[in-house]
Amino acid sequence: MDLQPYYLPAAIAGHILAAVIWVGGMFFAYTALRPAAAKLLEAPQRLKLWRKSLASFFFWVWICIIALPATGYWIIFAHYGGMARVHWHVHVMQVIGIIMILIFLHVFFVPYMRLRKTVKQENFQVASEHLAQIRKSVGINLFLGIIVLIVAGGLRYSPM
């Protein structure tokens, strides 16, 4: 059985799934978990919740930031024959995706690592500052992710 016809649909499905997991997770965290935690929990419990929640979510984001470029570039080079042969929307997705990955790497290695440390030390005032940095960066990445989804889902069909 020739599996070649199944590679492209599998790569596209994997690409979409990774984007939905990452952007959907940020949307949930920003619009649902954050407001509920702020209303219901005192700083120590809220910060511990965020530390644990982010640890779980970031595991999946790592998978996504590997899967998205891997599937995206495979589609571009194996199916389309290279960057010169894809439409403008692919270039937009690539640039924004790289920016999003860089923002995530900063969040993970700087404010998140500091959040983990300060929550463990029960220095909740400083931990709150790190969480605020994470919130701002996630807000930026969420906005960029929504732009990518709009470009991928609809604008790619524009006559430009």
Image (tube, rainbow, N blue to C red):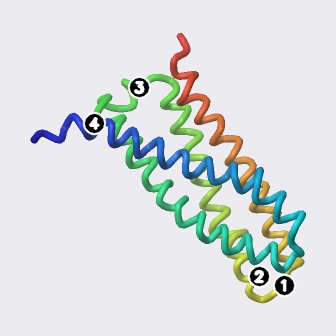
SS category of the residue bearing label 3: loop
Q: CA distance from mark 1 to mark 3?
A: 50 Å
| Contact, mark 2 vs mark 1 (Cβ under 8 Å) | yes
Q: Amino acid at mark 1?
A: Asn
Viewer-proximal residue, 30 or 120?
30
Residue 146: image quadrant is top right
Q: Which residue is mark 2?
A: 119
SS category of the residue bearing label 4: helix
Residue 100 located left or right of residue 6: right
Q: CA distance from mark 2 to mark 1?
A: 6 Å
Q: Residue at x 72, y 69 (%)?
A: 111
Q: Nearer the viewer, mark 3 or mark 2?
A: 2
Q: Residue furthest bottom?
A: 121
Q: Which residue is mark 3?
A: 86
Q: Amino acid at mark 2?
A: Val
Q: CA distance from mark 3 to mark 2?
A: 46 Å
Q: Amino acid at mark 3?
A: Val
Q: CA distance from mark 4 to mark 1?
A: 51 Å
SS category of the residue bearing label 2: helix
x and y, in percent, of residue 69 in the image = 44, 47
Q: Amino acid at mark 4?
A: Ala
| Mark closest to the chain's N terminus, 4 or 2 | 4
x and y, in percent, of residue 28 in the image = 69, 52
x and y, in percent, of residue 40 in the image = 87, 68
- Mark 3 crowd level (few <14, some 14–19, many ≥20, 10 Å Cα): some
Q: Which residue is mark 1?
A: 123
- Mark 4 crowd level (few <14, some 14–19, many ≥20, 10 Å Cα): few
